Image: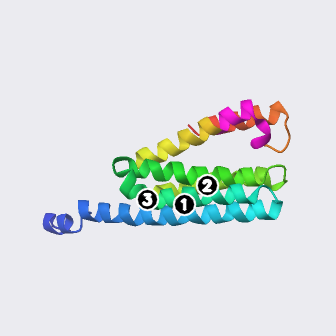
Amino acid sequence: MMSVRTLLSSAVTTDDLERNRVQGRRIVTLFTCFCGLIAILAALFRDNNMPLTATIALCICALSFAAEKIFSHVKDYALVVALLAQTSLITAAFDGHPWQTDSHMIYYVSLAVLILLVNPATLVFGAAMITLHHGLLSLTIPTLVYPASEVLPAVSGLRFTAQLF
């Protein structure tokens, strides 16, 4: 049987939690830049406005590195926005390609990476952002979400995304 002293000494401290959050922010920042590289390579592969994609991806990457200093009080949310912007850039780079639909799976990977921030609110914020983004684009510009411009896949995709909540 464990004593109370043993249990208290093995408990996670606030310092441990903050250390994990700092390390999580670093990993999310690096993954954001990696997604930017994927977007640039996809645009190059598709011959799909690579200079603009590269400029946007590099700016987002720079902002994710600067999030700690510039957005100190909302740094985790700034990282969520940066990561999801890079993810959207990947999907946009595959515009018109059969892999465009498959590129949406990166959103699920991004949500999983957000767990590293050790902040449940940022995970909910990310899921809400993806749902709003997907819903608005599905109804307004469905070709950015799906290769076909039919409304039926857009509505069924929106229904699936809404079920995540």
**Amino acid type for the residue under numbered disc 1:** Cys
Q: Residue 86 bears which disc, if any?
A: 2
Q: Residue at x 25, y 63 (%)?
A: 15
Q: Choose mark 3 or mark 2, whichever is in front.
A: 3
Q: Is residue 163 visible?
A: no
The crowding category of the residue bearing disc 2, from other C-alpha atoms within 10 Å (few below 14, some 14 to 19, many at least 20), is many
First reached walking from the N terminus: tag 3 or tag 1: 1
Specify which label sits upstream in the sequence, 2 or 1: 1
Q: Main secondary structure of the magenta part?
A: helix
The alpha-carbon separation of the residues under discs 3 and 1 comes to 9 Å
Secondary structure found at label 1: helix
Q: Would you say the residues marked 3 and 1 are in contact, meaning their CB atoms lie under 8 Å apart?
A: no
Q: Which residues are magenta?
A: 134-145
How far apart marks 3 and 2 lie (CA) works out to 16 Å
Residue sitting at x 59%, y 50%: 85
State the SS at label 3. Answer: helix
Q: Amino acid at mark 2?
A: Gln
Q: Quadrant of residue 149?
A: top right
User: Is 161 on the left-hand or right-hand side of 13?
Assistant: right
Residue topped by disc 1: 61
Would you place residue 63 above or below residue 9 in this image?
above
Q: Amino acid at mark 3?
A: Ala
Count of numbered circles on the image: 3
Q: Is residue 151 visible?
A: yes
Quick one: SS at disc 2? helix
* Horizontal relation, residue 38 to residue 154: left or right: left
Residue 116 in percent (x, y) is at: 45, 60
Q: Determine crowd level at label 3: few under 14, some 14-19, many 20+ residues with C-alpha closer than 10 A.
A: some
Disc 1: CA contacts within 10 A as few (<14), some (14-19) or many (>=20): many
Question: What numbered label is drawn on residue 129?
Answer: none
User: Residue at left 58%, top 50%?
Assistant: 84
Measured from the top left, where is residue 31 in percent x and y? 55, 64
